């Protein structure tokens, strides 16, 4: 919640910047830890969602593991104190350099996405006289019912191994003396809010683990990936995702055998509501058909709206705090603005037809729920300064 005290604090700070509410982050982490601990589930934080140092350190302090998708994320996870026995490494295109780095770090598990990758990891491990723990990332052909740009579990996606290739996987595993098969891994997409999807996933996981057991492979780990969505429309009234319901579904429908561990890799759900992107109105352009608010933040600071039409709540903090101070009974009437950035690309628009109070040059604008896939995707395009961050504490 961005109250007047916080808004007051923003007035002297150069925009744009990310504002991290570490208390909101901790509330979310508390809820996730408590809900997962009930069922003895293991949670890895998907570091690609946000690798801001303060955020990572806070998450690490909760004892979660780390889910990495690059060699540098593996390095960062270990540097930030995640135990190597809690680091997993996924990714459809791991380079030899990255695999070697992860082998040297003795990470817990590679989530392997092709038959060829199995062979390469085996060869590189053999050259070091090591054995690599691996899980097979299976493409379960479950539709995540989310935006097609962030769906990953359909046959047509590049991720994971399709089920018709599993015989080849089994043959390769039998051949590879330097791989240790740990289990099976799934990740079907992001910003999933339809819980039915997870029930379908559980059914596929059960089928797949039976298949591996029948082939003579003991499945020690079931890794269901991440993808739990957050409420981008109501960040103040619904700030913490429903971890209880999420984990309960897996408890109910997953066929967990004695001694098996169940793992998750949550990114967005843990961090999205902990940050807002704060910017100022540079110019107000009133056209004949359109009004534009031109901000000092754009796709170089937050790319999600431009990359996959993502919705973020947008607030005029300056006008909101004036209203709060004058305790107005009737809020001012609203105007529709296209809220755009300064970047020389037509796609540099946060949203069209946003209802906002009449806005002026210098007003502070908050783009909410920006803690996941926000700061991490910042760039220096147009040779702009890299976006800064400030913290609640
Ligand atoms: C991105 C990713 C995640 C996290 O996804 P969220 O939607 O942020 O929870 C988990 N696992 C893998 C393999 C990923 O690539």
Image (tube, rainbow, N blue to C red):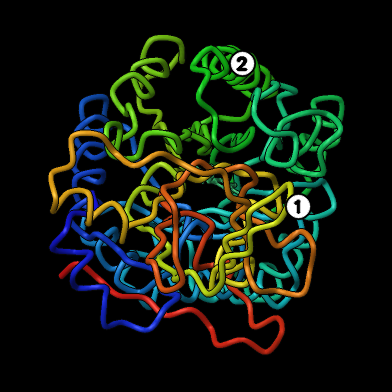
The answer to whether residue 310 is left or right of residue 269 is right
Of 39 and 340, which appears nearest the observer?
A: 340
Q: Residue at x 13, y 53 (%)?
A: 325
Q: Position of residue 322 (x, y in %)?
A: 22, 56
Q: Earlier in the sequence, mark 2 or mark 1?
A: 1
Q: Is residue 151 left or right of residue 221?
A: right
Image quadrant in which you'd find residue 354: top right
Q: Residue at x 30, y 32 (%)?
A: 238
Give the secondary structure at mark 1.
helix
Q: Return the residue nearer the eye: 327 or 241.
A: 327
Q: Is residue 82 above or below residue 225?
A: below
Is the distance from the Cβ of mark 1 to the nearest ligand 1 atom less than 8 Å? no
Give whichever of 345, 216 is nearer the camera: 345
Place of residue 290 in the rendered image (x, y in percent of width and height, measured from the top left): 69, 50
Q: Residues within 10 Å of mark 1 (few under 14, many from 20)?
A: many
Name the secondary structure under disc 2.
Answer: helix
Reply above or below: 154 against 116: above
Q: Is residue 210 above or below residue 293?
A: above
Q: Which residue is mark 2?
A: 210
Query: In x, y percent, where is residue 10?
Result: 26, 73
Neighbour tally class for label 2: few under 14, some 14-19, many 20 plus, Cα within 10 Å: some
- At 36% from the left and 46% from the top, the residue drawn is 270
User: Are the two marked residues, 2 and 1, in contact with CB atoms closer than 8 angstroms?
Assistant: no
Q: Which residue is mark 1?
A: 118
User: In the rendered image, which quarter is residue 379 located in?
Assistant: bottom right
Give percent across and percent down for residue 152: 71, 37
What residue do we see at 76% from left, 66% from top?
123
């Amino acid at each position: 919640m961005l109250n007047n005290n916080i808004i007051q604090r923003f007035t002297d700070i150069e925009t744009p910047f990310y504002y991290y509410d570490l208390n909101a982050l901790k509330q979310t982490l508390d809820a996730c830890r408590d809900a997962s601990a009930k069922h003895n589930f293991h949670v890895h934080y998907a570091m690609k969602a946000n690798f801001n140092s303060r955020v990572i350190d806070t998450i690490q302090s909760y004892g979660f593991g780390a889910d990495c998708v690059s060699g540098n994320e593996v390095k960062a996870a270990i540097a930030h104190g995640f135990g190597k026995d809690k680091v997993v490494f996924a990714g459809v295109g791991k380079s030899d350099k990255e695999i070697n780095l992860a082998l040297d770090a003795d990470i817990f598990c590679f989530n392997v996405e092709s038959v060829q990758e199995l062979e390469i990891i085996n060869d590189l491990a053999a050259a070091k006289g090591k054995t690599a723990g691996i899980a097979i990332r299976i493409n379960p052909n479950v539709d995540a019912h989310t935006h097609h740009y962030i769906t990953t579990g359909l046959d047509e996606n590049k991720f994971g191994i399709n089920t018709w290739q599993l015989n080849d996987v089994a043959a390769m595993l039998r051949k590879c003396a330097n791989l240790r098969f740990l289990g099976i891994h799934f990740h079907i997409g992001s910003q999933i809010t339809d819980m039915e999807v997870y029930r379908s996933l559980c059914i596929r996981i059960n089928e797949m683990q039976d298949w591996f057991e029948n082939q003579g492979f003991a499945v020690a780990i079931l890794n269901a990936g991440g993808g739990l969505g957050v409420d981008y429309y109501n960040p103040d009234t619904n700030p913490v995702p429903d971890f209880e319901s999420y984990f309960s579904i897996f408890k109910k429908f997953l066929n967990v055998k004695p001694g098996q561990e169940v793992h998750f890799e949550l990114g967005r759900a843990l961090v999205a509501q902990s940050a807002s992107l704060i910017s100022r109105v540079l110019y107000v352009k009133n056209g004949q058909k359109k009004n534009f608010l031109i901000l000092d933040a754009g796709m170089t600071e937050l790319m999600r709206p431009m990359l996959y039409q993502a919705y973020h709540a947008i607030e005029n903090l300056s006008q909101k705090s004036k209203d709060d101070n004058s305790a107005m009974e009737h809020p001012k009437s609203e105007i529709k603005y296209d809220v755009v950035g300064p970047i020389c690309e037509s796609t540099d628009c946060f949203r069209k037809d946003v209802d906002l109070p009449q806005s002026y040059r210098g007003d502070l604008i908050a783009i909410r729920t920006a803690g996941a896939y926000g700061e991490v995707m910042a760039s220096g395009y147009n040779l702009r300064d890299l976006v800064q961050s400030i913290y609640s504490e």
